[in-house]
Amino acid sequence: MLTRLGLEGDLLEAVVLGPRLAAGTQLRTLAWGAVTLADRGMSEDKLICREEPLGAGQRRTVLRLFRFYARCKGLLN
């Protein structure tokens, strides 16, 4: 079970790449990277998890996704 606290005091969040999981599913997997996002002036960390490591092309795609997500979130705030 993940018990480290994120910067906002919440449990550290993780994004698990792969098939959709049911809400509340607990699993043991590996973290291959992390991204830091700003939300209303506060930073929050998200671990990027997957059973197997990401290839170079997959890493670029994930980074593009998070950049797009961050821009959209910034527009909404």
Image: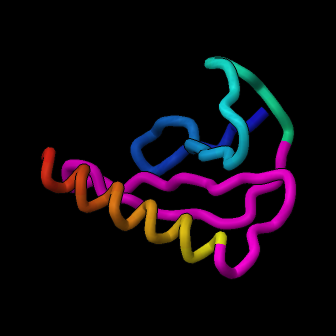
Which residue is pictured at 56% across the width and 76% down the height?
60
User: Which quadrant of the figure contains the N terminus?
Assistant: top right
In the image, is residue 21 above or below residue 36?
A: above
Residue numbers of the magenta segment: 29-57
Q: Nearer the viewer, residue 20 or 7?
A: 20
Residue 73 in picture, x, y percent from top left: 24, 50
Horizontal arrangement in the rendering, residue 3 relative to residue 28 (left or right): left
In the image, is residue 34 above or below residue 13?
A: below
Which residue is pictured at 67% across the width and 45% down the height?
16
Q: Nearer the viewer, residue 71 or 40?
A: 71
Q: Nearer the viewer, residue 31 or 65?
A: 65
| Rendering colour mode | rainbow
Horizontal arrangement in the rendering, residue 20 relative to residue 51 (left or right): left
Which residue is pictured at 49% across the width and 55% down the height?
45
User: Does the magenta run of residues contain 21?
Assistant: no
Which residue is pictured at 56% across the width and 37% down the height?
11
Residue 69 in picture, x, y percent from top left: 35, 55
Residue 62 image-quadrant placement: bottom right
Q: How many marks?
A: 0
Residue 15 in picture, x, y percent from top left: 60, 46
Magenta region, main secondary structure: strand
Horizontal arrangement in the rendering, residue 6 relative to residue 18 (left or right): left
User: Does the magenta run of residues contain 55?
Assistant: yes
